[in-house]
Amino acid sequence: MIVDQSIVSCRASLLTLAFFLLCTSLTGPSQADTSLVDFEEIPSIRPETTNGLQTFFQTLDYDWAALEDGVPLLILENIPHDIDQIASIKTKKHSFFMGLLPMVLLANQEIQKERRDVQLILSRHGTGQLQDADLERLDKILKRYGLRGHPLTDHRTRSRLLRRVDIIPPSLVLAQAANESAWGSSRFARLGNNLFGEWTYKPGTGIIPAGRPAGATYEVRKFSSLYQSIRSYMNNLNRNGAYRQLREIREILRDSNQPVTGMALAQGLAKYSQRGNAYIVEIQAMIRQNRLMRVNNASLRLPKAETRKIISTAGSGLFSSRSNMIGHRLPARQDP
C-alpha cells in the first residue's frame, strides 16, 4: 500500500491504545454500543489530504461494498483541505460520504439512547419505580428538544416528545451535508465546521456571509467540530417548528411499521431553503443518484483484530501530528 507522504505521521502507540480502550469499552463482537463509550476513547483523525483519508479507509476495509460488515467508529476532525481539487468525482464523493457516515451513525445512536430512556421513564410512571435520576434525565431531554410541560401526565406533551426524539435517516443527512457545504469545500465548512448552513443571531459568534442584505443581523454558525455540526443539525430538524411536517411524516411511518427513509422525510424540508419544493426535489435526486439509501441500515462496528494491527503498525503518513487519535473530547453541546 502506498502511503501519502504529504501527511505527517501519527504515533503508533497512541493508535494501539485508542483501539484497546475502544475494544474494552464496548459490548458485543461487532455492533458498537456507544452508550458505553466515553467520547475520549473514540479515535479521531485529522487527514491532511483526500488521498491520505482514502488510504486510511483501505486499512479499515471500509468501502461501499463492505457496509454490511459495519462502519468503523471514528471522529473526522476536518474535511481534507484538497477535496475541492480532486479531479475524480467518485473519489471526492467517497471521501466525503465515508468520512461523515460514522459520525452520523454515532449521533443517531445518541438519539436512539435518548428515545429509549424516554420510553422507559414513561413506562415507569404509575408503577412506583420512578427515581429522581429518571426525572432529571427527562427534564434534560425536554430542554434539549425545546419542550415544556409534563409528559408523565400530559398526553399532548408526551406525544410531542416522542415525535421529536427520533433519528434522522443517514441518507438525508449525507445528501444535505453535501448540498449545503459543497462537498465540504464551502467557506463555512472550512472556517466554522458548518456543514448545513445553520444560522445564529448572536452578533460576533459566527461568520458573516457575503452578500448579506443590509440591515440583516444573522451570521452562519461556527462549530468546534464537524460532529457538533451534525448533532446540531439533527436537533434543529427535531425541534424547529419549520420542520413539523418532517416529524409528522416520520411518526406516520413509525406507526405503520414502515422504514424511516431520507426520501420520505425530505418531503418535510420545504422551509429549509427559499427554493421550497425545488430544494426537496434536488435533495431526493442526490439521494437517488448517489445510492444513499444503502446507508440507512448501516451500523457501527469495531475494527477487526487484524485491522487494528495494521493501523497500529502502518500509521506513517496517515494523520497530522495535531491528531492524537485519543483524548478527543467533544465540547458541551449547544442547542440551536
Image: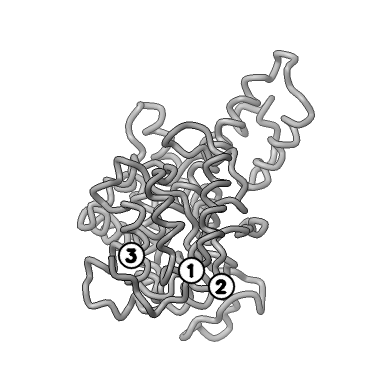
Q: Nearer the viewer, mark 3 or mark 1?
A: 3
Q: Is residue 266 left or right of residue 146?
A: left
Q: Element type at marker 2?
A: loop
Residue 181 placement (x, y as % from top left): 40, 70
Q: Residue at x 50, y 41 (%)?
A: 109
Which residue is labeled 3 in the image? 55
Three-letter amino acid code at disc 3?
Answer: Thr
Where residue 317 appears, as percent x and y from the top left, is 41, 72
Q: Residue 294 falls in which quadrant of the image?
A: top left
Q: Are marks 3 and 2 in contact (CB under 8 Å)?
A: no
Mark 1 sits on what residue? 46
Q: Quadrant of the N terminus?
A: bottom left
Q: What amino acid is labelled 1 in the image? A: Arg
Question: Is tag 3's residue or tag 2's residue first in the polypeptide sequence?
Answer: 3
Q: Provide the residue designation for mark 2.
A: 322
**Most distant residue in the right direction:** 132
Amino acid type, mark 2: Arg
How much space separates mark 3 and mark 1, taking CA atoms? 13 Å
Residue 240 shows in this picture: no
Which quarter shows the C terminus?
A: bottom right
> What's the distance in space between the residues labelled 2 and 1, CA to CA?
7 Å
At x 32% / y 41%, what residue is drawn?
Answer: 69
| Nearest to the observer: residue 252 or residue 110 | 110
Classed neighbour count for the residue bearing mark 2: other residues with Cα under 10 Å, few (<14), some (14–19), many (≥20): few
